[in-house]
Amino acid sequence: MAANPALKRGIRFRDLALFYVVVALNVRWTSTAAAAGPSILVIWLAALFCFFIPLSASVMELSSRHPEEGGIYIWTRRAFGDFTAFIAAWMYWMSNLPFFASVLYFGAASVLIPFGSRADRLSSSPLYFMAFAAFWLTVTVVLNVRGVDSGKWLNNICSIGSLVPLTLLIMMAVVSWHKFGSATQFTAASLTPHLSFDNAVFWSGVFFAFGGVEAGSAMGDEIQNPRKTIPWAILVGGIVVTAGYIGGTAALLVALPSESVSGLQGFVNGVHALSDRLGLGWVLVPTALLVGVNTVGSTAANLSSTSRLPFVAGIDHYLPPVFGSIHPRYRTPWVAIAVYGAASIFVAILGQAGTTVRGAYDVLVSMAVVCYFIPYLLLFASMIKLQREPAGPNIRRVPGKKPVAIALALIGFTATSATIVLSLFPGADQPNKALAVAKVIGATLIQLGLGIAIFTAERRRSRRSAAVV
């Protein structure tokens, strides 16, 4: 970066480990996965070894080589220059805008479940969903502007929204299987994935669930001893996330047949079935509410980390320099956080603003999956390129060093490329598949073009300003 910002190093090991849990472990993915049947457990393992482990190893080493604020922006800039770094950051932070809205809508629906038919009016009210999303995004922005200490406690508290429901689900499933058996038969045949185009498209979403481990490194200058803290936090957080996804998916299949599991209702129905079977009906209400808490934490953690990317781009003058401002009292990148939060609120409202606009929003959500994985391609490519740099004794390398690092990065790059291709294709229920593909590709190209235009305009402005001086 052009300057060494006086950010506060307030993030400790516990905070970062819980951050990785809340940013990566989302209970909705367990029910989405369980709907595919027992074979999805094998796909979880494939995603673990082909994407999550290569990603975690790359982030560990890259964070040790370059632990500064900005994470993926710093790594890609070091490997490929300013333009590539800006595009990686641009695609990353723009792809998260519709993600925040979709996650908070999921949370808004989940907190209504305990109220049953009394909440029917709210469940069909766009105003309720807009208000829920806008309120929690505002809370997140205010806490993160006030300081890293305030923001991290929201993440820490909200981590119970995934840990407690999944732990209860898994424990109840173990007891229920022991007493009553499983609702799903786990056999060699049922665990064998059946390759088909529709299944392959669905499997790409499982890889998406394992994303996010790179997010903490964006706050490198706010982490205490990042070279030591980040690897250990990734290791602990990664174990929890892996156990949560695989264990939670298996538990839902113990509770219900796969055809009865879908979306939010699938997770809650699984908890409901197990709690009724074991005489623990009281578990349902707090579990549903905690699922809502999980969505708030996931949004808060992603927003707090992703907002650091426009901050470092502002310091480097590839966004207006005001984005690089640090609050004189709270020592936070407050302009970047506030602007990014305001954009998130706008997109959340856009998602419920009307039928026509909602159709455009659906395209944005589909586009987000594609745009989200493009920075991963650059991350893995940076891992390979930066192996040419010497590494001192204080750098934490991947076990096996350069040969293993390159092999893991190539595996991750290949898996990410396949995921991007599969994400372009619509589901079986899409009536006009060609139009849907064209919309996603077109919207992605527009977003990419907009990033290129902003980079070019800001670089020209900076050069003119330097020439005047």
Image (cartoon, helix red, strand yellow):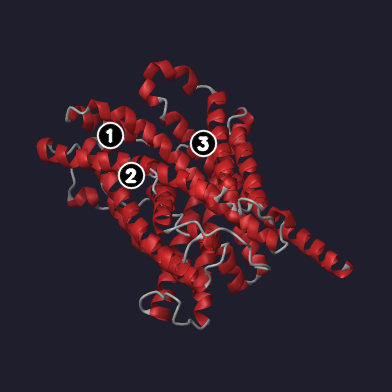
Label 1 to label 3, Cα distance in Å? 31 Å
Label 2 to label 1, Cα distance in Å? 16 Å
| Residue 321, disc | none
Q: Name the residue tied to disc 3.
A: 431
Tell me the element at label 3: loop
Q: Amino acid at mark 3?
A: Pro
* Outermost residue to the right: 468
Q: Nearer the viewer, mark 2 or mark 1?
A: 2
Closer to the camera in the image, 66 or 440: 66
The disc, 2 or 1, on the residue closer to the chain's N-terminal end is: 2
Q: Are marks 3 and 2 in contact (CB under 8 Å)?
A: no
Q: Position of residue 105 (x, y in %)?
A: 49, 34
Q: Are marks 1 and 3 in contact (CB under 8 Å)?
A: no
Would you identify the image quadrant in which residue 7 lies?
bottom right
Q: Nearer the viewer, mark 3 or mark 2?
A: 2
Q: Position of residue 407 (x, y in %)?
A: 41, 74
Q: Position of residue 84 (x, y in %)?
A: 63, 66
Label 2 CA crowd tier, 10 Å (few <14, some 14–19, many 20+): many
Up-down relation of residue 417 to residue 117 (above or below): below
Tell me the element at label 1: helix
Label 3 CA crowd tier, 10 Å (few <14, some 14–19, many 20+): few
* Outermost residue to the left: 179
Q: Name the residue tied to disc 2.
A: 163
Q: Name the residue tied to disc 1.
A: 270
The disc, 3 or 2, on the residue closer to the chain's N-terminal end is: 2
Q: Amino acid at mark 2?
A: Leu
Q: Amino acid at mark 1?
A: Gly
Q: Quadrant of the C terminus?
A: bottom right
Q: Position of residue 122 (x, y in %)?
A: 49, 21
